Amino acid sequence: MSVLVSTNPAQNYVPLGEVTVSTLAKVTEATSRAHMAKKGWSSLSVKERIELLKPIVDAIFAAREDFVQLIMSETGKTLSLSRDEVDRGAVDWLMENAETILAPQKTCDKPGETHEIWYEPFGVTAVITPWNFPLGEALKSLISTLLAGNTVIFKISEECPLVGQKLGEVFTKHDFPIGVFNQVYGDGSVGEALTNQDVDLIVFTGSSAVGEKIYKKAADKFIKAHLEMGGSNPGIVFADADVKSAAQIMIDARFQHCGQICDSMKRLIVEAPIKDDLEAAMKEILESMTLGDPTKEETDFGPLVAERQVRLAEAQLQDALDKGARIVAQLEVDKSLKGAFFPPTILADITPDMRVWHEEVFAPILPIVSFQAETEAIALANDTIYGLGSRVITADMDRAKRVARQINAGNVEINQGSRWLPCNPFGGYKASGMGRTYGEAGLRELCQIKMVSAA
């Protein structure tokens, strides 16, 4: 049997451990178990599912420090961000609200008649999650899908198999009903084998390129695909904004986790009169930050997740420089650092033909363009195949909301606003996916809707 070796991108790719890659026979076996379990799991009430899931959730967060160390080691995420990821707030919200959200919903109130929507599971679900939030994304997808009454075959990214293994061990040790949670390991070929199986629903978080293939496969199967994919979020800053505040907001929005977040702010669109001042303010902030060992408290930037990500980012950056882009600020990678380290960079003099503008950049690179008129800003914001998130910074709230209505994205944050509450739905337009996670909309996305009328 082949094995998948996990390595540390911050320590010159030293091996951390390994898991056995799932063969086609193992994937088929897992699917069979999920089918055998789906009737029993779906027949439970939401309350009964919560009672079975609660000890699992408690055990996962009791092992918080183990998960923090695994996330840091496998992905290079900094200590502070790894701690932030191992937070149970979103999961607790799902557990506390699932009964109400998935309860029958009355649609009409007439004497002698009842009209209700019932939320019922699809059945066997393939759940495929990414490496940038290995525990957070996995729990969001798994707990939501299981609460909705679906059984699961789970595959985590090949970049973080040890996080997935630890998660699977918790389910196994707590005698979770056989066949309700199943796990397979491997790279994209195992994911493809999984989506080829007889499944009733596919829940995928990852790149738009892979998501598009899954969408086509789901169409051939005539099943639903719930897709959370890439993004190239625009951030629009108007001239009436406070420059110092806007600079900090944009640095935080772009450079967290080295820019390896689908929903990070990837294109800065700034009104011409304050462009130079904003560039200077952002340069000052970036140059005060630290690139280095992700296990140290003071580190702001660790490595990228893998060497292939470094090579891609280098190519995207070089393309911009070859076409005339100017470096506003750039941190230096100390020669003592061995691994997937890449210099956080702010770029100006950007043109639409540059890869950093029209591709998703999953690295700490921020391109800046300027605009003269509001209509131009909106056009620049929408000049992308993606539509996940966006941000507008202005002192004029009427203008902020007017612009927000015209941005083609699933989320718009205004000034210091944050959509990151578990009660808020999250998802995108265009190539950023379809469907929503979190909130009422997210849980109900994972259900069949049955209309029941009686008189």
Image (cartoon, rainbow, N blue to C red):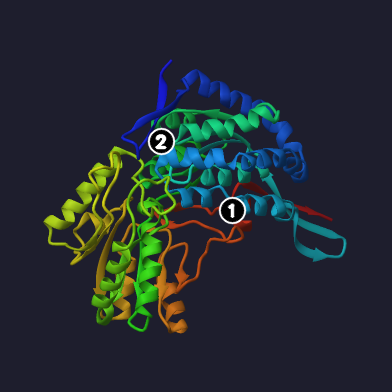
Q: Residue 91's x, y, as percent?
A: 63, 49
Snapshot quadrant of residue 387: bottom left
Residue 442, labelled with which disc? Answer: 1
420 up-or-down from 362: above or below: below
Residue type for callout 1: Gly
Q: Secondary structure at mark 2?
A: loop
Residue 159, labelled with which disc? Answer: 2
Q: Residue at x 52, y 57 (%)?
A: 426
Is residue 276 shown left or right of residue 126? left
Q: Quadrant of the N terminus?
A: top left
Q: Residue 259's x, y, as percent?
A: 36, 54
Q: In this orientation, which residue lies closer to the viewer: 267 or 169?
A: 169
Q: Quadrant of the C terminus?
A: bottom right
**Within 10 angstroms of label 1, few (less than 14), some, or many (20 or more) residues?**
many
Is residue 159 shown left or right of residue 439? left
Is residue 274 shown left or right of residue 437? left
Residue type for callout 2: Glu
Residue that extends furthest to the top in the rendered view of this protein: 1
239 up-or-down from 85: above or below: below
Q: Residue 162's x, y, as percent?
A: 49, 32
Q: Nearer the viewer, mark 1 or mark 2?
A: 2
Q: Residue at x 51, y 43 (%)?
A: 68
Is residue 209 shown left or right of residue 35? left
Q: In this orientation, which residue lies closer to the viewer: 52 or 338?
A: 338
312 up-or-down from 395: above or below: above
